[in-house]
Image: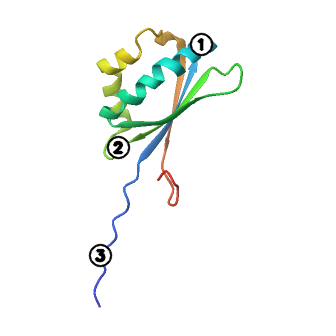
Amino acid sequence: MTDPSPIPERSRNMYQIKTYTLRTSEALQKYATVQWPRHVSSMPPFGATVHGFWTDEQPDAHRLIALLSFRDGVDPDEFLASYIASPELAADMDGFDAADIIDVHDILLEPVAGSPLG
């Protein structure tokens, strides 16, 4: 009887939900329609993929919610430090007052076996 080799676990992506609270509805509108579309192409070279971004439909919430994933071996904190210091992010944010972002909340997600995004 031979000992079967273990089947390697399928590589799993790390996902993150980022929630940004903005000062006004005008700031949210600009952030959602100008800055985040730019992030879609500027984040991948740093190891992150934008899967989508949405606005909270509550009238006074002024929140943008984004779903990201990270390539294998990319630490979300290291990604953030590199991205924040990059000329790519500076270009993305050109014309936007970062002081209009009043809160950022991150949630890291671990896919469960059977999850379609796993």
Q: Which residue is mark 2?
A: 71
In depth, the one of 51 and 97 nearer the eye is: 51
Amino acid at the residue labelled 2: Arg
Q: Which residue is mark 3?
A: 5
Residue 24 in sight here: no
10 Å crowding of disc 2: few (<14), some (14-19), many (20+):
some
Name which residue lies at 71% across and 21% down.
59
**Residue 73 image point, x, y percent:** 31, 45
Measure the alpha-carbon separation of dots 1 and 3.
56 Å
**Residue 26 image point, x, y percent:** 60, 11
Amino acid at the residue labelled 1: Arg
10 Å crowding of disc 1: few (<14), some (14-19), many (20+):
some
Mark 1 or mark 3: name the one nearer the start of the chain.
Answer: 3
- Whether residue 48 sits left or right of residue 115 in the image: it is left
- Whether residue 21 sits left or right of residue 86 in the image: it is right
Amino acid at the residue labelled 3: Ser
Kindly state the secondary structure of the residue where label 2 is placed: loop
Measure the alpha-carbon separation of dots 2 and 3.
26 Å
**Label for residue 23?**
1
Q: Indicate whether 2 appears above or below 39.
A: below
Instruction: Specify how the rendered protein is coloured.
Output: rainbow
Could you say which quadrant of the image residue 62 lies in? top right
